[in-house]
Image: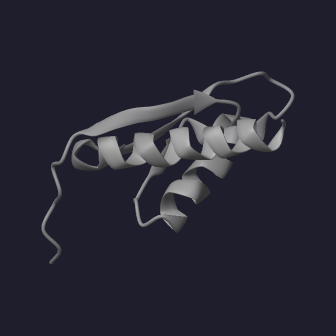
């Protein structure tokens, strides 16, 4: 039987369902496990404007924020 992981989860992003999925993919491609909270509503009723969260383990928070901020920096730099 697998041992239960009781590591607290912390929010690193909140936004639209598609932005959350992109952020989750970015984190996971950098080796950081993440989950989308409340993402099911965006799938069931996409016409409703819902905000969903991306959560990571507390120990991955710093690394996750660096990845997210790095991704935003690259996005901003490419617009110049």
Q: Nearer the viewer, residue 34 or 38?
A: 34
Counting from the top left corner in percent of width and height, residue 52 is at 59, 31
Residue at the extreme top = 49
**Count of labels shown?**
0
Above/below status of 4 relative to 76: below
Residue found at x 63% / y 38%: 72
Counting from the top left corner in percent of width and height, residue 23 is at 60, 47
Compared across the picture, whether 47 is left or right of 29 comes to: right
Q: Is residue 36 visible?
A: yes
Residue found at x 22% / y 40%: 8
Quarter placement of the C terminus: top right
Compared across the picture, whether 75 is left or right of 54 comes to: right
The color scheme shown is one colour
State which quadrant residue 16 falls in: top right
Counting from the top left corner in percent of width and height, residue 51 is at 64, 25
Residue found at x 49% / y 49%: 67
Residue found at x 50% / y 62%: 28
Quarter placement of the N terminus: bottom left
Residue at the extreme bottom = 1
Q: Nearer the viewer, residue 31 or 77?
A: 77
Above/below status of 49 relative to 34: above
Compared across the picture, whether 63 is left or right of 59 comes to: right
Compared across the picture, whether 6 is left or right of 26 comes to: left
Q: Is residue 20 visible?
A: no
Counting from the top left corner in percent of width and height, residue 19 is at 70, 40
């Amino acid at each position: 039987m697998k041992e239960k992981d009781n590591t607290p989860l912390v929010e690193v992003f909140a936004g639209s369902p598609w932005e959350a999925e992109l952020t989750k993919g970015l984190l996971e491609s950098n080796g950081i496990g993440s989950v989308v909270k409340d993402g099911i509503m965006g799938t069931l009723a996409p016409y409703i404007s819902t905000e969903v969260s991306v959560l990571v383990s507390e120990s991955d928070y710093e690394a996750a924020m660096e990845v997210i901020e790095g991704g935003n920096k690259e996005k901003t730099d490419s617009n110049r």
